[in-house]
Amino acid sequence: MIDYHLHTPFCNHATGSMRDYIESAIKKGLAEICFLDHLILAKDLKVPSMIPCEVPLYFLSISELKNCYKDKIKIRSGLEVDFFENKMDIIEEITGEFAFDVIAGSVHFIEIDGKLINIASRRSLDARKNIHPDVIRKKYFEKLNLMIECDYFDTVCHLDLIDRFKHSDGNTSGYRDILKKIKKKDKVLEINTGGYSHKKGAPYPSFDIIKMCYEEGVKVTLGSDAHKPIDVGSKFKETISIVKSIGYKNITGFNKQNSFEIKI
Ligand SMILES: [Zn+2]
Ligand SMILES: [Zn+2]
């Protein structure tokens, strides 16, 4: 089993050392993990992310740990990069000189009337109160579409994060077209079990959408989005058994941005 979405202290809002995450993964019997910490380039925002000049140290730290633990567990290096369409050049410049295994794309922020709203933050609920949910949804989908167009990304994280503060039976309309585009662009969709500990009570995306993924032939990978070592591999057993019952026989891993299949 693999966990392709682990945070680290570099993002300033995850607890435990990188070694603690690795030890937790070994204890839980995982064969492979990928650090996927935040790189968010949003100006004028106190962002929960490493800053660009920390990218080299982050990459080196993973490389060292890869080596240290090579007899016990396979460790991959990745980044969870927030998509900002006008920042892609600089993001590519910052990350381009490092041979990351995975570059994952996330949309946590949308811009409405010049203001950035973090759709994944409880603190943004006040700012969202006066905006019609359809407007927020439309903006979110616009951004997702642009991100999927972008060749820079290998995977798409937590596709229905917009439903973080709702129960799992969210509105699935609009996702079919997005999934067709993900397939066309040959990207991999992440199944993120972090949603189990949110109000949603289900993975991102919901099983209804994972079913659509399967129908559209979209490949999937798996991540816990752990911000604490104890959450590594959380809810994987139940998630995998449902993913298998949907029809999937493999999940996808990455080596230097080349995908490979892992039997489940
Ligand atoms: Zn995220
Ligand atoms: Zn994350």
Image: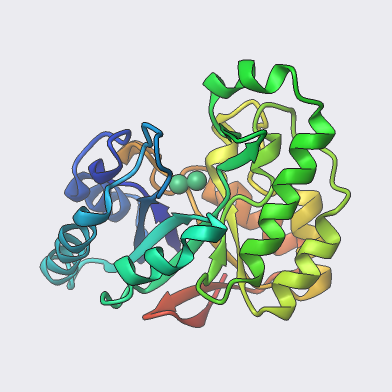
Residue 169, can we see it? no
What residue is rendered at 44% in x and 67% in y? Answer: 103
Q: Nearer the viewer, residue 263 or 91?
A: 91
Indicate the colouring scheme. rainbow
What is the quadrant of the C terminus in the image? bottom right
Based on the displayed image, in which of its 4 quarters is residue 211 positioned?
A: bottom right
What residue is rendered at 40% in x and 42% in y? Answer: 43
Q: Residue furthest front?
A: 114
Residue 208, can we see it? yes
What residue is rendered at 47% in x and 73% in y? Answer: 253
Q: Is residue 175 above or below residue 100?
A: above
Residue 52 image position (x, y, % from top left): 27, 55
Q: Residue furthest right?
A: 173
Residue 233 image position (x, y, % from top left): 43, 49
What is the quadrant of the N terminus in the image? bottom left
Residue 161 image position (x, y, % from top left): 64, 42
Residue 120 image position (x, y, % from top left): 56, 34
Based on the displayed image, in which of its 4 quarters is residue 138 positioned?
A: top right
Q: Is residue 139 left or right of residue 39?
A: right
Number of numbered callouts drawn? 0
Q: Is residue 182 left or right of residue 238?
A: right
Based on the displayed image, in which of its 4 quarters is residue 20 positioned?
A: top left
Q: Is residue 198 left or right of residue 229?
A: right
Q: Is residue 183 above or below residue 179?
A: below
